[in-house]
Image: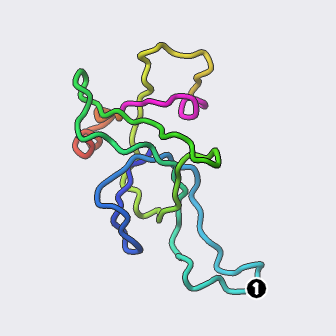
Amino acid sequence: MIFILFTTKIKIWHLGTRIGRLRVIFKLPEKIYGSWPSPSSWPSEPLAYIEWFDKLKKTAEPYHDLYLVTKPSLLADGNPPGAIIPLSSIRQSCHLLPDFSNGVPSNWTTDTVLDNCRRFYLNSFSSKYAYQTLW
């Protein structure tokens, strides 16, 4: 998971930060079909496709002081909300803890938990840097 900074040289979406799942990093080609130059409006810097989580509440959960992170509902086309953003707007990685309040379903593995779990806690204790920047 990543922590996004929304102020970039290209565009200002929102002021502040947001949690997202990085799905792919890519760069648009300089030539199309090997011979035609790409449009000048295309960004030349690396880009990232992000699937968004819901925005964080203003306060952490009362018992453990961790912020609750939830997956949003799928869009009408069946895909999660996402965006293509400049890679340079990614601020840092972050550690999410699955919500185990209803037990651990047998289909959860390290490979599937991000797809199957809907609620996570933002672990601000994963490192000193995370504590200083996320709390």
User: Residue at label 1?
Assistant: 35
Q: Position of residue 1 (x, y in %)?
A: 45, 43
Q: Is residue 101 above or below residue 55?
A: above
Lateral position of residue 34 relative to residue 70, left or right: right
Q: Is residue 36 above or below residue 57?
A: below
Element carrying mark 1? loop
Q: Position of residue 120 (x, y in %)?
A: 42, 30
Q: Is residue 119 magenta?
A: yes
- Tell me where residue 10 sits by quadrant: bottom left
Q: Which kind of residue does numbered mark 1 sit on?
A: Ser
Lateral position of residue 75 relative to residue 125, left or right: right
Q: Is residue 125 magenta?
A: no
Colouring of the image: rainbow
Q: Position of residue 108 (x, y in %)?
A: 58, 22
In this view, the residue in front, 117 or 134, is: 117
Image point 48% across, 40% down: which residue?
72
Q: Which residues are magenta?
A: 111-121
